[in-house]
């Protein structure tokens, strides 16, 4: 077996790893690289391999940094199957189409600028039509249902607990008369987190590809997170301000909505309206309702306690789909909570809400997830006094609060506990990916201390023999 790392190597985004085994070539994830515009455009457009030579692809979960370049893969000649969970397939049906829309809009915006300079237009990375066509390649599987996907290669998807449908990829490969097991964590969730079941450890793996987003950091306890959320909302309400929450449409939005529902049921919040302003989040929440098989026991009890109540809907909550309804939120003068995408405040309707609210000291920008370098979300976390939105400068007078407890990623201790359950018997090597370089190196050192003989932090393009 041979592994080559093409994305999420000494960086977080663009998850993409190639496994060559038993004469087959299997792609693990095909995510969009998210970084400086020009670099991202070139890297995403030019796949680092011949798509026609890939026999199958396995998708760990639906987040765009793992799934977002699938339309390019298919457009470039890939004709194999894309194996993933049924929930991930359903999420991608909305998310890839939304991504195609963003690619078209971005190209249109760039081309207006290029036209003024007399420069030739650029093509979008892919279109809505490309995204829709790529869905023909998806094959949905259930958890813990082994399936032979290629000669001598059996795939099992296990619960990762990160977002709806997320999976740890387990591959049993027959080569030279013996079977070896490779596990790929995808992104791992937190043990005891609401909505989803806990990550399921893999037994008998010889090799592990493991994420390290929070490989050098600890989260706040899950138990105290709702209290933190309540404090932020109550304090802002008393100032007469609004709470603006950049949140990923998949996973984080539903977690925040469910937390607000719990607080409402417990009568711990003031009487203020709550808006989810994201067409994609609206669509994704409908997918959540279709997949109760992914829910944990706590959420199922919450649903059962009130004759099947909807955890993602309650009296004070409004889902905003149309652009006109979104614009009306600009005229709110009373306290409110506005949850909107994107989670790193790089695109989408959240930019309009930030533009209209960051200069008011009564308001709070609530950050509920990791923010990549060079994003508006990171600049807000750093409390830079001047932030650019749509090319215009705004003074950051609003409060900025960060709650880490809603993170969908396991922290350092949780990652080490998860890998620790896999070491015996026979975990020979671990490859640390999907983290900022400092986080990867720190986590790799900790894995070495656990007793794993070979721990590698691969560079982009690096080939490793197993």
Image (cartoon, rainbow, N blue to C red):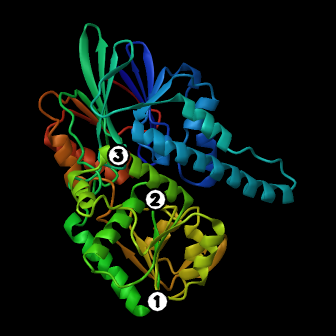
Which residue is most to the right?
118
Residue 308 placement: quadrant = bottom left
Vertical position of residue 320 compared to residue 204: above or below: below
Q: Is residue 48 visible?
A: no
Q: Position of residue 230 (x, y in %)?
A: 30, 78
Q: Position of residue 344 (x, y in %)?
A: 49, 62
Residue with the most extreme front position = 307
Label 1 residue SS: loop
The residue drawn where x is 37% and y is 45% is: 291
Q: Circle 1 is placed at which residue position? A: 362
Q: Residue at x 23, y 62 (%)?
A: 305
Q: Earlier in the sequence, mark 2 or mark 3?
A: 3
Cα separation, mark 3 vs mark 1, equals 36 Å
Identify the residue position indicated by label 3 in the image.
Answer: 187
The disc label shown at residue 248, or none? 2
Residue drawn at 21 percent across, 52 percent down: 297
Front residue of 119 and 96: 96
Q: Position of residue 127 (x, y in %)?
A: 67, 43
Q: Quadrant of the C terminus?
A: top left
**Label 3 SS:** loop
Would residue 222 appear left or right of 333 to someone viewing this image? Answer: left
């Amino acid at each position: 077996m041979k592994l080559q790392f093409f994305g999420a190597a000494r960086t977080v985004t663009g998850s993409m790893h190639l496994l060559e085994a038993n004469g087959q070539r299997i792609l693990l994830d095909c995510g969009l690289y998210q970084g400086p515009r020009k670099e991202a455009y070139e890297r995403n457009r030019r796949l680092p391999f011949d798509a026609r030579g890939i026999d199958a692809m396995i998708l760990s979960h639906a987040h765009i940094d793992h799934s977002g370049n699938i339309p390019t893969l298919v457009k470039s000649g890939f004709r194999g199957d894309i194996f993933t969970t049924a929930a991930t397939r359903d999420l991608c049906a909305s998310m890839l189409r939304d991504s195609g829309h963003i690619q078209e809009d971005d190209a249109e915006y760039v081309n207006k600028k290029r036209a003024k300079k007399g420069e030739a237009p650029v093509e979008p990375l892919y279109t809505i039509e490309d995204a829709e066509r790529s869905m023909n390649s998806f094959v949905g599987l259930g958890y813990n249902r082994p399936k032979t996907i290629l000669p001598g290669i059996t795939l099992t998807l296990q619960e990762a607990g990160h977002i709806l449908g997320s999976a740890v990829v387990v591959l049993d490969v027959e080569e030279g008369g013996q079977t070896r097991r490779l596990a790929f964590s995808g992104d791992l969730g937190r043990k005891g987190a609401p909505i989803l079941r806990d990550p399921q450890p893999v037994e008998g793996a010889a090799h592990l590809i493991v994420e390290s987003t929070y490989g050098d950091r600890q989260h706040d306890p899950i138990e105290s997170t709702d209290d933190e959320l309540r404090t932020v909302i109550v304090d802002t309400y008393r100032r007469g301000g609004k709470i603006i929450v950049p949140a990923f449409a998949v996973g984080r939005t539903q977690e925040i909505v469910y937390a607000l529902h719990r607080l409402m049921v417990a009568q711990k919040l003031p009487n203020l309206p709550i808006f989810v302003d994201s067409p994609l989040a609206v669509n994704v929440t409908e997918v959540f309702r279709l997949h109760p098989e992914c829910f944990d026991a706590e959420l199922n009890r919450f649903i059962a306690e009130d004759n099947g109540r909807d955890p993602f809907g309650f009296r004070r909550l409004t889902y905003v789909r149309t652009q006109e309804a979104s614009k009306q939120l600009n005229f709110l003068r009373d306290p409110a909570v506005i949850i909107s995408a994107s989670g790193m405040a790089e695109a989408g309707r959240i930019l309009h809400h930030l533009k209209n609210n960051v200069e008011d000291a009564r308001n709070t920008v609530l950050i509920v997830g990791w923010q990549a370098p060079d994003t508006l979300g990171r600049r807000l976390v750093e409390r830079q006094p001047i932030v650019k939105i749509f090319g215009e400068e705004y003074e950051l007078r609003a409060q900025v609060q960060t709650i880490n407890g809603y993170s969908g990623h396991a922290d350092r201790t949780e990652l080490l506990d998860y890998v620790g359950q896999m070491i015996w018997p026979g975990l020979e090597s671990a490859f640390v990916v999907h983290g900022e370089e400092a986080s990867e190196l720190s986590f790799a050192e900790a894995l070495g201390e656990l007793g794993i003989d070979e721990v590698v932090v691969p560079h982009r393009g690096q080939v490793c023999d197993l």
